[in-house]
Amino acid sequence: AGTMPPPESDGRAATDGERAPTMSSETESLRKKVATLTVINGAIQKENDDLRAARDDAGGASSSRGGNDASADASAVVAQVEAECEARLREADETIDELRRELTEIAKGGDAAQSANRDKTVKLREAKNEIAALRRRVSELEGNERRLNSQLRDAEADATRAAKAAENNSRTADGIREELGASQADANREIQSLRRRLNEREQTAEKTIATLRETLENERSDATAKEAKRARSQVASAETRAAIAEAESAKLSRELATARETAQSREESLRQELRAAEDTARTLEATLSEQRHAGGFAREVAGAVATVTRELERERTSRRAAEDEHADRVGERDATIERLGDEMARLRDELRDARSAVSRAEAARDERREAADEFDRRRSEAESARTVAEARAAEAVAVVTARAEKAERECVASGEKCAVLSAELVALEETLARAELEAIRARRDADDARKQAERIRTTPDADGASGASPSAPPRHPAIAPRGVVNPEPSEKPPDAPPPSVGGFDVAALVEANKANFANDFDVETANWLTSKEKRLIAAERRTQAALRSKLAEAEEKATALTKRVEELETRLEDAEVAGSNSGGDGGEGAKKRLKELRDALREERDAAESLSARHETLLEVLGEKEEEADRLARAVAALRGAGRESHTAFRSALERQLEDVEVAGSSPGKIAGRVFVSKDVDEPLDD
């Protein structure tokens, strides 16, 4: 009794025996599930490895080039992988919970499956650890996503800044264009004033231009005449062809009308014959119906009626064939008429085009005539202006000649006065020289006596030294031979060059005028320029410097924008490579984002190209303005050089005349200074 198991033990053993097959099957199913989870974990781990490699590639691209453009693809892939990982993790958690519940139930059944449960628990713990590692990796990917999102925001901010920079460049270019327009307006006004001054020096050029324009006008008139003649011939040929086509159309219309009338008359006669035959047939039929009782005569009448009916049918068939043939001929004639109508329309169009060409040729001829009349009017105005300028120049020469004669008379009178004053001055100088000589001698004697007394008082043995002759006193500047005029201390030495007329050097002026006016020189020391011209040159230089600086800034901005576009293109290519390597299911979103980035890059490239085009245009305009300014400056320099040389020659002649009438001992420099300071060379010639 002690060795028998209790009933409960027997029941439990029976239950364990019944559960053994069930536990083995459940163990196999659990093993299959664990294998499935292992495969799933391996796939997830492989995907995580791929994502880590893509992240490393994206991180390397971002470390070398910023990684702003690859963030879109990486963020899309990371988001998709996160969603998949979360779903799979939830499924794995649910599977693990189910397995735990099953293991718990199995553990309640007996100790035989505890070892398997422990193994499964260990495997589940390992799977859970792997899932935790996956979660950590997902967290890392989320951190990478946040970092890439921040880089994406930085890239968008860079794109916004680039757009703003492009807008600023556009506004800067517009401002430069406005400033250039203002400077161009100022330059145009100055050019107009300079052209008014240069009209006197353009006679030969105007003659050449007039000859060339006459030749050109003759050639244009010949070309216009030839074109008009050719157009007239085309119009005539077109009108001839149109007349021929109209005649053919009218002929065909008449033939068609005749054919239609003939057909209608024939159709009417046929209809009348048909009606007569039908009346005859009806009469015969009525007669036949009345005489049916007549026997053999009825058969004859029936045969006659049948014969007449067959003839009528043949006549109808022939008439239908004739009508069809007539309809075909009418259709052919209609097609011919339609073709002729199209030909007429085409000929009318050609005629209209030829007439419009003639009108255009006549309008061009009228415009050329008006241009020639306008040129003649302007040439006459220029000739009248030149005549007025020549008259003014003659008046100015007369005024200058009168002033020169007056100055010459004043110089003669001044010379006479200077002669008298020179004689009186010589007498006064002689008296002053004698007085100064006596004073010097008295001073010398007093000095000798004082020195002798001092030597006697200081040194008793200074007799030999006192016998030495003292050095001769310095000669006073006023002591000079008679007839020689001593130069005053304020005057220049005789070997110095003569003073320049009007406060400038003529040789320096000629050399400066021969030089290029557009080269860099000191405007302040250029005394042949008026103050207005100095201000204009300074303003032009400031404008050009400002334009160059702004163009340099625009060029730098365009270069920076181009580099930025190239960098964005490189990053976009890297992002495409990263997106292709990731191989996720979120390729559509990545493609969309890449397309948006491409569009943004294309817009940036277009903006850079437009800015470069504007920059090139501004450079061309600036070069043209500089060339025009150089040309005008050279013309002004040549004109002013010629005027200065003629003015200098005139004054030199006046100086020589004054030197001829001067009396010996006078001061020609002072007289010339008093005479010629009335006209300042810095003033314009036409003032």
Image (cartoon, rainbow, N blue to C red):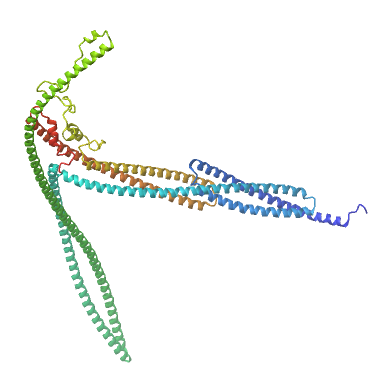
Question: Where does residue 206 sit, x and y in percent of width and height?
Answer: 13, 44
Q: Is residue 275 above or below residue 133?
A: below
Q: Quadrant of residue 239?
A: bottom left
Residue closest to the eye, 15 or 529: 529
Which quarter of the figure has residue 526? top left
Above or below 465: residue 211? below
- Nearest the viewer among 495 and 613 is 495
* Image side of residue 468 versus residue 481, left or right: right
Q: Foreground residue, 431 or 148?
A: 431
Question: How many labels sit on residues?
Answer: 0
Q: Is residue 2 left or right of residue 197?
A: right
Q: Farthest residue toward the right?
A: 1
Residue 250 figure quarter: bottom left
Residue 446: x, y in percent? 20, 17
On the question of residue 594 being in view, the answer is yes
- In this view, the residue in front, 363 or 508, is 508
- Regarding residue 474, the answer to whether it shows in the image is no
Establish if 471 lies above or below 272: above
Residue at 63% in and 52% down: 89
Residue 192 in the image: state x and y as whole percent.
20, 47
Q: Is residue 412 left or right of residue 473?
A: left
Where, quadrant-wise, is the N terminus in this rendering? bottom right
Q: Residue at x 25, y 48 (%)?
A: 185
Q: In the rendered view of the protein, which quadrant contains the C terminus?
A: top left
Residue 670 location (% of width, % of height):
14, 32
